Image (cartoon, coloured by chain):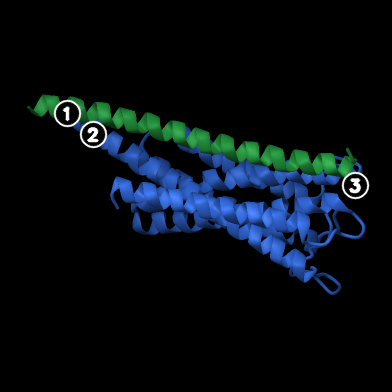
Amino acid sequence: MEIGLKHLFYAFAIVWALLLGYVFSLARRQKQLGDELETLKKALGRRSN
Amino acid sequence: MNESARHRLSLALLVVALLLIVSAWYYAFQVAPTERTMGTIQRIFYLHLPAAFLSFLAFFVVFVGSVAYLTTRRMGWDWAAASAAEVGVVFCAAVLISGPLWAKPVWGIWWTWDARLTTTLILFLIYVAYLMLRLYVTDSERRARLAAVVGILGFVDVPLVYMANRWWRTQHPEPVIAGGEGSGLDPQMWWGVLWAFAGLLTFASLLFFQRYRMEAMRAELTELARRARA
């Protein structure tokens, strides 16, 4: 593969991997927060009943 | 906005962003002309430049959010600043990755401590420090106040990055956009870069809204935990 082409491929591939990694990290953190919120709401609901 | 409407809007933004990005890069590779001196490696430009603009824009939002927070003390502004900082750091990292991969075949080196490259690295480190500060301060109001100060002071580096290759003679090429005499872009290259910018901007907006939602959830969690302890 031509050297320029190799670097071009790496640039696009690494940046896409970075963006995808960030999307997964956001999704994981959001799910974790959602689960914690749900648990706390249930606990508070039980306490008020 | 309810949960299902929010979900639909996010999905729509994602579809639009992906369509724009894929078509822009197809245009960049198949329609835009090959640059005369650098050849095909110059097409990194359609990733590097929009990512750089997006990181500037994100840090501008941090600046606006920080000023607005210190003026109004409304937490929503702090959440916006924090969200923009995280998205900005991701795009700034994209610039710092794609830059050396472009530099190596063209300059023969991965990195040099010239004004444009160094100020960009400093910009990245400032906003990483901003995010770390947010992690270590637990009191939300104190965190927002301190982060706002760093967000405002850190923004000083953005015009420095922009002007670096205008003020100083650097290894980095002279600007092709809004540069001096003899600068400029082929109209087809212009379209490619604007198209890619539109796609990445839509994607960045989606990331920003999702990150902002996380801040809102975290605030709700803190409030519920406080009630649970009471």
Element on which disc 3 rests: helix
Q: Position of residue B28 (x, y in %)?
A: 74, 57
Left or right: B126 as drawn, with respect to B175: left
Q: Which is more foreground, mark 1 or mark 2?
A: 1
Label 2 sits on a secondary structure element that is: helix
C-alpha separation, residue under disc 3 versus residue under disc 2: 56 Å
**Subunit under mark 1:** A
Instruction: Confirm whether circles 3 and 2 share one chain.
Output: yes
Q: Colour of chain B?
A: blue
Amino acid, disc 3: Trp
Residues at badges 1 and 3 in contact (C-beta under 8 Å)?
no
- Cα–Cα gap, marks 1 and 2: 8 Å
Q: Is residue B57 above or below residue A45?
A: below
Which quarter of the picture shows residue B222? top left
Residue position marked by numbered label 2 in the rendering: B224
Kind of residue at disc 1: Leu
Crowd tier of the residue under label 1, counting other residues whose Cα lies within 10 Å: few below 14, some 14–19, many 20 or above = some
How many numbered marks appear? 3
Q: Quadrant of the C terminus of chain B?
A: top left
- Residue designated by label 3: B107
For the residues bearing labels 1 and 2, Cβ distance under 8 angstroms? yes
